[in-house]
Amino acid sequence: MKKWLEPLSNAWEGAKTHKLRSSLTILGIVIGVAAVISLMSIGRGTQAEIISNIESLGSNLITIMPGRFAERGVMGAAGSAATLTLEDAVAISEQVPYVTAVAPSSSASLQLVAGSKNENAQVIGVTPEYQETYNLQTTEGAFISPYDYQSGAKVAVIGANVRDELFSGVDPVGQQIRMGNNVVRVMGVLESKGARMMGSTDDAILIPLTTLQETITQRRTSAGEHMVSSIALTVSNQEQADYVVSEVTSLLRSRHQLAPGAEDDFTLRSMEELVSTVSEMTGTMTIFLGAIAGISLLVGGIGVMNIMLVSVVERTREIGIRKALGARERDIWSQFLAESAFLSFSGGIIGVGVGWGLSRLISGTGIMGSITTVVSTDIVILALAVSVGIGLLFGFLPARRAARLNPIEALRYE
């Protein structure tokens, strides 16, 4: 045991003898490790937040968008294709089993005016099922009812940001909002959902879809069917999601009169598929961030090698004496390699603490906006392993050079 501890003891003595030099060497590793941990924690936090936002919509949600998606789930021209209709939604609700709710919607960007205040917002025409499908809750008032939808009532449910912008300090329920040439009465306020990958209702105003079609935008197909921007549906059991997707695809192809072999003019996405795609994309981003931060560790490793080469030159006579007294090349090699690994490991330990602190600072103070950071065990282990590996890699050349010194020439060195 003593034989194994001797290189570590010598490494500690060497670090104490040259405190300033050792501290500067360790600092390079600290910066590298801290950068790796903080940047990768940002990547992991972003991934966790996006996935949480998607899952909060419900694992049984399936969305249908018009047109085709390009590579890796990115739509080439979102909403440019007008291929979905209100009648498609009705057919899905009536003919596809295991579907519990179907919510078609359409939207338009309009200027909202309430008193002396105004704001540009997205106006979304929805059905009563929209609340259940997207898991929305109201903090004040109520959501759009079946009666409001059937009668085309001029009522609205507003997002949290719209409320703050137009009705700061005033109870919005019962107040009126002008949308272009139309006036609607606020009947409810939605619970804040925050920024979302799939869009946020915080900056939106929801009105009955019938009201939107009658007063703001009236888009019909050549067959007279009412066009919509999207259709969302929920299934009774997640295990039936693939079956529902297959049935909906078959139904829509039939309704849209697509020839066999022709591409779909719509795109279906389940939450499970979307989570998988997002996990893959954000995982790649996290690795990319870690690789960028790894450059700092590489620079720190070069610093370790430089210091160890200087140490070999300074201790040339010591090496000569040890060899003259019977030390083998392996003994000299292990001593210098242990010193290099000791410096990098010490820097790694301190860097973990600094990186964790930076991650908490970024997440807690919001100095980079509303960013969530996640410092996981695998990130810490990876950073420590890489820091030690850097020490061994960049310490190998100095250790090899020290081990191969000629003892006679080393003793003559001044």
Image (tube, rainbow, N blue to C red):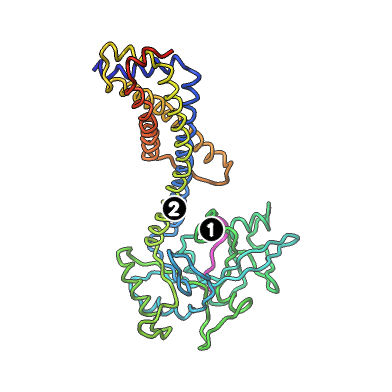
Instruction: Tell me what residue is drawn at x 50 percent, y 88 percent.
Output: 223
Q: Position of residue 261 (x, y in %)?
A: 36, 82
Q: Residues within 10 Å of mark 1 (few under 14, many from 20)?
A: some
Q: Position of residue 265 (x, y in %)?
A: 44, 78
Instruction: Tell me what residue is drawn at x 27 percent, y 23 percent.
Output: 330
Quadrant in the picture for residue 378 = top left
Q: Amino acid at mark 1?
A: Thr
Q: Residue furthest right?
A: 116
Magenta stretch holds residue 183 = no
> Looking at the image, which is closer to me, 391 or 357?
391
In the displayed structure, 177 sits above or below 355; it is below
Compared across the picture, whether 326 is left or right of 73 comes to left
* Residue 148 seen by the camera: no
**Residue bearing the label numbered 1:** 138
Quadrant in the picture for residue 187 = bottom right
The Cα–Cα distance between marks 2 and 1, rounded to whole angstroms, is 31 Å
Q: State the extent of the magenta-drawn residues as a range.
A: 139-149
Mark 2 element type: helix
**Residue bearing the label numbered 2:** 282
Q: Position of residue 235 (x, y in %)?
A: 36, 67
